[in-house]
Amino acid sequence: MEYGPLKLVPERRELVVDGEPISIGSRAYEIARLLVEAKGDLVSKDEILRRVWPAPPVEENNIQVAISALRKALGNHAAAIRTVSGRGYRLVLSSARTNLPANTRSLIGREGVVAHLQGLLEKHPIVTLTGAGGMGKTCLALEAARGLLSHFTDGVWLVEMASLSDGSAVAHAVASVLRLDIPDNLAQPKRIASLLASRKLLLVLDNCEHVVDSVAELAYTIAISNPALRVLTTSREPLRTAGEILYRISPLAVPPEAMADVNRLIDYGAVQLFVARTRAMGADVALDPANVKAMAAICRRLDGIPLAIEIAASRAATLGIVELSRHLDDVFRLLTSGFRTALPRHRTLRATLDWSYDLLTEAERRGLQRLAVPVGRFTLRMATALLADGGDVGDPEVVLEGLVEKSLVVADSVNGEMRYHLLDTTRVYGQSRLRDSGEFDTVARLHAKYCLGVFASAESDWQGNAQADSLDELEYMDLLGNARAAIDWAFSSNGDAALGLCLIVAAVPVWMFFSMAMECRQYMVRALAMFAANPQPDPDLEMRLLTAHGMALLSTMGSGTDARQAFTRSLHIADRLDNRDYRLRNLWGLCSLCLNDGDFRAARKLADRFYDFARAAGDPNATAWAELLLGGVISVLGELSLGRRYVEAVVQRAEADVLNPSPNRFLFNRRVLALGLLGSILWQQGYADECKRCLDESVNEALSGADVLSLCNTLANWVCVLTLERGDLPDAQRYMTMMVEHAARYQLDFWLLWARCFKGALMTRQGDLAQGLCILRASFAELGSRDRHPRFTKLRALYADALYRAGHESEALAVSEAGLLMAERDGHLWMLPEFFRIKGCALWQQTGGRTCPETSRLLNEGMNLARRQGSLWAQLRIATSLVRVNRPNGRLDEALAMLRDTYARFGDGFGTPDLVEAQELLKEAG
């Protein structure tokens, strides 16, 4: 156990100083042991009392007596024991074996890195810490070196290269620090290596990037001459010498943007550093939600770069944290007040990047400027497209490699392929340099054209010719970020509006692929406004814009009037251009709008027309969608068996027979919707278990493809309600939560309103009728005219049923009557039997349980309609109600016979609430 000239021999409880054993008492020995173990860190008085005098009480002057005895025993090293007033003691042994500066600040968020570096130095002769400016390379190197002082008998020595003007002074600087007796003109690597051949030391060479060649020569020469010697260097680029091992410093961990848990935000190293440095400035930092979220935003904006965070913390101490977070658009103007004791290039964020920029070749400088245009990660192909047209930029691959080595471009291996990105601060800096050069618009145009090419190929691929390399590009390149940047430039005063319009149309599949329908809708509004302001004789472009606009409105439940106008106008153009693909897209859109409006009779006509066009075009994908539309419309119109045949044909169709559709062609995952719809039909026909299998598969299919629009549709149309009807209340709650989370994340407000309605219905089944009805009343009042949407028809029935069960007969009659009128008017015929049942039961309950002719008429009409439709589920519920309403007057035989006959036709689902209730009634009757 050693520290500097001090060595402890535990088995003999002996202290050795400069090789000589020293006789000391047991208390002094224990204190010496604590100080040596701490290796220069503070040992508090409390720790000394706890470890050396475990049995209280002990006066503090006992420590002073033991320290005094220890100092006397150390002789010439007595001054090494330093008193830290009011706190404790530490050993300071810097004069003989190291020139490392004392540690004045704690290292935050890097604890594991220090240990890893120390492990590398045990195994490798040369270790280079590399990374962008401001990452804290020097702090990490010094902290790792301090912890290794006891491992090197000849010390740990720091040589600062920042002040050297050229490489010729490197060897002399090393010789001077190590106090080697060499004349200036003989300070050469080989001479230094010969003098260090027998020494066991660690040499820390800091800030080497501007003299990297000379440092590489020196490090290699002295390392191969002495296996016991180690060299630790910090540089923004590697030495590229034999024996070197690289450790690239990454930014501090920053919390993801979606994270909202304040307690978890504080756990990230970047946030911890910000808190510590702000408090060190004397600011009283309250860790309330607003402050912590603002800190997280600041750290993300600064890429987790320690230097930038420390400078920001100093500004936060005066501006306030939340205020600072609002003014980070111009980080270089704001972050200008670093530490006065820092090197000049570390006093501001811009100075740090200026230093790196000045060390680049001219080709690398222009390369950095051009690569600052892409957003997020980019491929070598994009880099080549932006650099190849750069005149004297040089070989794109060589330039990119140089920028990666100099830590200005970050390279990541993703599935065996390299992806690149600039830290946001570096990107802002590069763009400012590009604007200064006058080339920004030229490079922005190249970037926009490249994005257009990628997007155009993506649309083609998603329509059936998927190519692995194209999909790989789409998966790993930040397409949406690049789309935004390219469109913003194209619509700027120096941009190209026509190129921007083409970009928006081509980017629609990408927005839909990532379920960013609301963003797509916003860009379509912007594109149409630009198209109207700059009319172009391009009917094909207008057709594509209008169709995309209609699809975006449809997927976000936007204005039905606007969507209908867009689809109708686009269909007219498609007919004029004889564009079969867009004719089908617009017919599908118009049919879907009729479904959303609840006008199923009009939807039937459009679905038939769509089906005929699809078959005539020989388009199997469109034909499958036509079958799904027909199946959905026909089943809602009450023809369950025919509707089921259409839908089963879609589900059973082999994947190889149908080309994968473009997401902006028919918007949704056809299989997800087909399974959900089939589950609904099977439920009505009495196949409860098969229904559950289809619904589960529908949800899993949507989740596996991260298809949010299709997921919300299947959850709202079928899964949530039918799970509730099955009596699976925990699953119903889980599915509702799933829908809320996805709808909120993707700003699909329509689905959130639906979820609130469903929450009310769920609560009425969970036993909280009063609160559930309160939510249902408020939700339907908020809906207004939107309650015509078929997704709310079933919820209206659940609402009316809950009112009836709660004893609010008048309300139940009003809601069920409104449901009957709407269902008859718009063709929601599949729900008529249920509305007849609820209205009849509410009327019976309102008359005090006396069966009246109107009650019997309503229930019998509902039963007859359910039989014609083939809805066994509706027949069971009506038969059950008939038994209940006829029990008081003794006319049960016919009702019981009807219930027994209906119950006997079920083959599964006997644990569902409706079948359980029927079974109990039959058991009571005997």
Image: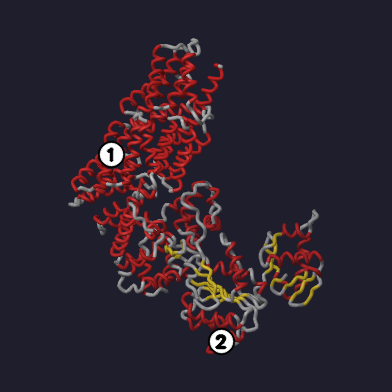
In which quadrant will I find the N terminus?
Answer: bottom right
Amino acid type assigned to the residue bearing label 2 in the image:
Lys
- Which residue is depicted at the point 43% across and 30% down? 685
Query: In x, y percent, where is residue 151?
Result: 66, 73
Q: Are marks 2 and 1 in contact (CB under 8 Å)?
A: no
Q: Is residue 484 visible?
A: no
Q: Is residue 190 above or below residue 908?
A: below
- Which label's residue is closer to the chain start, 2 or 1? 2
Residue 871 visible in image: yes
**Disc 2 to disc 1, C-alpha distance:** 83 Å
**Residue at horizontal 55%, vertical 48%?**
263
User: Where residue 792 sits in the image (x, y, percent)?
Assistant: 39, 31
Where is the C terminus found, in terms of image quarters?
A: top right
The residue depicted at 45 percent of the width and 59 percent of the height is 302
Q: Quadrant of residue 491?
A: bottom left
Amino acid of disc 1: Leu
Instruction: Kindly state the secondary structure of the residue where label 2 is placed.
Output: helix
- Looking at the rendering, which quadrant does residue 449 occupy? bottom left
Q: Which circle marks residue 190 in the picture? A: 2
Task: Tell me the number on the disc at residue 373.
Answer: none
Per the image, label 1 sits on a secondary structure element best described as helix
Q: Residue furthest top?
A: 889
Q: Is residue 831 left or right of residue 43?
A: left
Circle 1 residues within 10 Å: few <14, some 14–19, many ≥20: many
- Percent across and percent down for residue 719 are 45, 36
Q: Residues within 10 Å of mark 2 (few under 14, many from 20)?
A: some
Q: Is residue 447 above or below residue 739?
A: below
Q: Which mark is residue 590?
A: 1
Colour scheme of the picture = secondary structure
Q: Is residue 103 left or right of residue 463?
A: right
